[in-house]
Amino acid sequence: MKLSDFDFDLPEGLIATRPVRPRTAARLLVADGDAMRDMHVRDLIGLLGPGDRLVLNDTKVIPARLTGTRTRITGQGDSVAKIEVTLLEPRPGGHWSALAKPLRKVKEGETIRFSDVLSAEVVRIADGQVELGFNMTGPDFDAALAEAGAMPLPPYIAALRAPDAQDREDYQTVFARHSGAVAAPTASLHFDDDLLARLAAKGVAFTHVTLHVGAGTFLPVKVEDVTTHRMHAEWGEVSEAAAAEINATREGGGRVIPVGTTALRLIESAVDAAGRMQPWRGTTDIFIYPGYSFRVTDGLMTNFHLPKSTLLMLVSALMGTERMRRVYDHAITSGYRFFSYGDASLLLPERRNPVMPGRAGA
């Protein structure tokens, strides 16, 4: 399986730099087996109903992009350098791993000041990353970060424009609860409170899980044999209640449809070999590519992904590589908007998950 199998040409004009408003006005390409329909996210009301369960990732994006200064005392006076930092993931003791630009401008033991109250010591430099020890933790750190930080827009958007105040709303889901992500579960950005309420009134059920999306989601695949690619690890949790809800839907013959590849990867990490969801907490580096046998997923709502990306491989595993190639050809020809702020797709393969057997001993 070659990396080139997942390549395609995308006109730059189809890369969305702002979301549409309202959120539910985004276009929705429905791929039901081989059939395709051009719809809008608001049309989910007619596509889903009683027995269906949407799995939502309730992670909350932190304003992980910081700009600060490093001051170094030299024989010629103070040497001040501007340093841009992107937080990647928390470490024990209030430390964070991060990217720093320019990396050559910082040394271990130096301090980067981000605001009047927020600063961090460069504890360690290794493998192109820094470990930062901040001068505060807990709620104090959260408040200072909210004041000093900016939303960590994906590199393909950041290359076209800088983040601004509007991104604090646009790049956050309406059901975000648990802080820790440095990238949004972008398929969920299409939902607003009104659509959620209308779906619930229609009989659609919801389950919340948490996967803190890391910056590794944007890392390119660098090997030609994609089966040798090592996936980044991300922390997630499926509660006992969430596992029970998904199991109940499967036992009743309903469809389990994660919203976003992050929710899909998490529930596929938490399901056992018999197809039964288990409570789960930890890091997952599950890599899903064609040939993977889905245990709990019946469909997927997701945005349109980067060429040669692990996410394109995931949707190809769900729908089939040739079918996904036709879906993407249609999306490009029809002018769908791509990537994090772009339009969405609803992918419904032929039903392959059997109804789960009853509980043991029941």
Image (cartoon, rainbow, N blue to C red):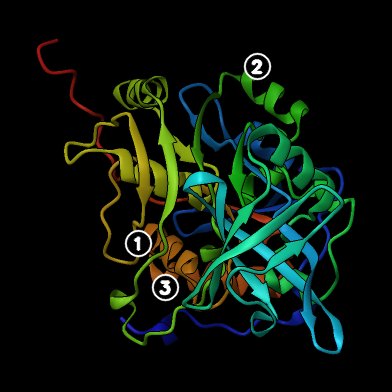
Horizontal and vertical percent position of residue 324: 48, 67
- Seen from the viewer's position, the closer of residues 106 and 341 is 106
* Spatial separation of the CA atoms under disc 3 and disc 2: 37 Å
Question: In the displayed structure, does residue 280 sit left or right of residue 168?
Answer: left
Q: Is residue 35 left or right of residue 166?
A: left
Q: Residue at x 28, y 40 (%)?
A: 353
* Residue toward you, 120 or 191: 120
| Residue name at image x 39 percent, y 28 percent | 254
The residue most toward the top is 362
Which class describes the residues within 10 Å of circle 1: few (<14), some (14-19), or many (20+)?
some
Up-down: is 208 above or below 228? above
**In the picture, residue 107 is in which quadrant?**
bottom right
Query: Label 3, on which residue?
Result: 322
Q: Secondary structure at mark 3?
A: helix
Image disc number at residue 287: 1
The residue carrying mark 2 is: 201
